[in-house]
Image (cartoon, helix red, strand yellow):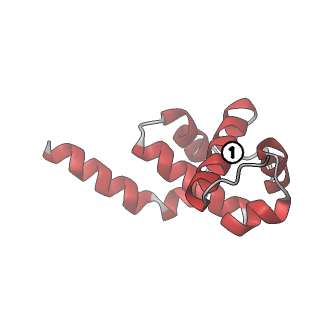
């Protein structure tokens, strides 16, 4: 019997698979097809949640910042990823929160 995951759990499963591949290879050396294979679903199944690898990488970077996962954030900065510009406001807010503590 196949157990169907809720949308929230499937989305998290995809993010975790992408994080694992990012650690194993690099944040920039996987495709959505690689993620689909790792999760065991079809490419359209991944695209239902994340239309592009860029969108998924953005989610990973935001999660990495929120959990103080420096390894993935450093990869993005070193590679001069344009996503770092997009998430810089989020990072700035987190830094301001830390300074207020």
Q: Residues within 10 Å of mark 1 (few under 14, many from 20)?
A: many
Give the camera-side residue of 94 and 8: 8
Quarter holding the C terminus?
top left
Residue 28 place in picture, x, y as percent: 73, 47
Give the camera-side residue of 5 and 69: 5
Q: Mark 1 points at which residue?
A: 18
Q: Residue at x 59, y 46 (%)?
A: 76
Give the camera-side residue of 2 and 41: 2
Residue 8 place in picture, x, y as percent: 56, 58
Q: Which residue is drawn at 82% across and 46% down?
A: 40
Q: Residue at x 69, y 42 (%)?
A: 17
When the figure is inspected, residue 30 is found, relative to residue 83, above or below; the finding is above
Residue 86 place in picture, x, y as percent: 50, 64
Disc 1 is placed on an element classified as helix
The furthest residue to the front: 1
Residue 91 place in picture, x, y as percent: 38, 53
Q: Residue at x 59, y 52 (%)?
A: 9
Q: Please state if 92 lies on the left or on the right of 47 as rendered.
A: left
Whether residue 50 is visible? no
């Amino acid at each position: 019997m196949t157990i169907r995951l809720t949308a929230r759990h499937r989305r998290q499963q995809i993010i975790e698979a992408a994080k694992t591949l990012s650690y194993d290879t690099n944040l920039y050396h996987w495709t959505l097809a690689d993620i689909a294979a790792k999760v065991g679903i079809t490419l359209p199944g991944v695209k239902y949640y994340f239309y592009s690898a860029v969108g998924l990488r953005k989610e990973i970077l935001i999660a990495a910042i929120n959990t103080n996962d420096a390894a993935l954030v450093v990869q993005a900065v070193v590679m001069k990823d344009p996503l770092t510009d997009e998430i810089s406001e989020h990072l700035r807010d987190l830094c301001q929160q830390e300074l207020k503590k």
